[in-house]
Amino acid sequence: MKYISVFCGSSSGNDNVFPEQVSLLGQTIARRGYGIVYGGAHVGLMGAVADGALKQGGQVIGVIPQFLKKKELEHKKLTKIHVVETMHERKALMNELSDGVIALPGGYGTMEELFEMLTWAQLALHKKPIGLLNIDGFYDSLIALSDTMIKKGFLKDEYRELLLVDNDIERLLDKMEAYKPPLNDKWFVTA
């Protein structure tokens, strides 16, 4: 891995543990020699992860749609910023620029980005590790929902391995570094 896409909220949440852990993640990614690709804003958890990495001298690439840049949300101290027209272009470019993905706490946008990357992995459109940093149990319900999808026959058990989950930053990054994509079954041809 050279760059990790980070999906997270544009707000900070209602507990200081979220921005503190997200800043620490940014610092840890930079100390490990990786760069970050993220949504390009200076606000919320997005700003915290970027600032954490920049504090350690890390490379941070932002990808921001023009309509959000106009609202003055653009982080002005990034290594590089790409301005795109649409949210779809943002996701596509973030995917193109990164070798792995980490989802942090966030809202609908974060969920949509995470699930698209999981779906693409399930369809063998990419073989990148996808990490979920489960800060303060934020994703416990999502993990339980995944178990229900498997139990009810809507998700194959082997696809559970597509999502690497941990509440510890170092362990999560270790899992991502050691990741081997599962072999897809006969329905999908791998690239």
Image (cartoon, grey):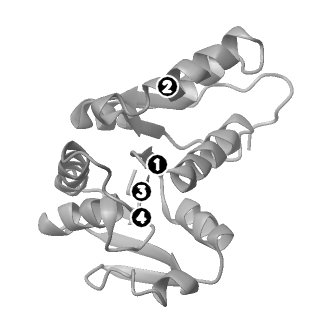
Secondary structure category for the residue under label 3: loop
Instruction: Point out the tag, 3 or 1, that comes first from the N-terminus.
Output: 3
Q: Which-is-in-front pick, marks 3 and 1?
A: 3
Asked whether the beta carbons under mark 1 and mark 2 sit within 8 Å of each other, the answer is no
Label 3 amino acid?
Answer: Gly
- What is the spatial separation of the Cα atoms under label 3 and label 1, in whole angstroms? 18 Å
Relative to residue 106, is residue 92 drawn left or right?
Answer: right
Instruction: Point out the tag, 2 or 3, that comes first from the N-terminus.
Output: 3
| Disc 4: CA contacts within 10 A as few (<14), some (14-19) or many (>=20) | many
Q: Residue furthest bottom?
A: 70
Secondary structure category for the residue under label 1: strand
Percent position of residue 186, x then y: 84, 23
Secondary structure category for the residue under label 4: strand
Instruction: Point out the tag, 2 or 4, that comes first from the N-terminus.
Output: 4
Quarter assignment of residue 168:
top left
Label 1 amino acid?
Answer: Gly
Residue carrying label 1: 100
Residue carrying label 4: 37
State the residue at coordinates (69%, 41%): 119
Secondary structure category for the residue under label 2: helix
> How many numbered marks are there?
4
State the residue at coordinates (63%, 65%): 92
Work out whether residue 160 can be spotted: yes
Q: Residue furthest top?
A: 151
Asked whether the beta carbons under mark 2 and mark 4 sit within 8 Å of each other, the answer is no
Label 4 amino acid?
Answer: Val
| Disc 2: CA contacts within 10 A as few (<14), some (14-19) or many (>=20) | few
Instruction: Point out the tag, 4 or 1, that comes first from the N-terminus.
Output: 4
Residue carrying label 3: 9
Instruction: Point out the tag, 1 or 2, that comes first from the N-terminus.
Output: 1
Residue carrying label 2: 141
Label 2 amino acid?
Answer: Ser
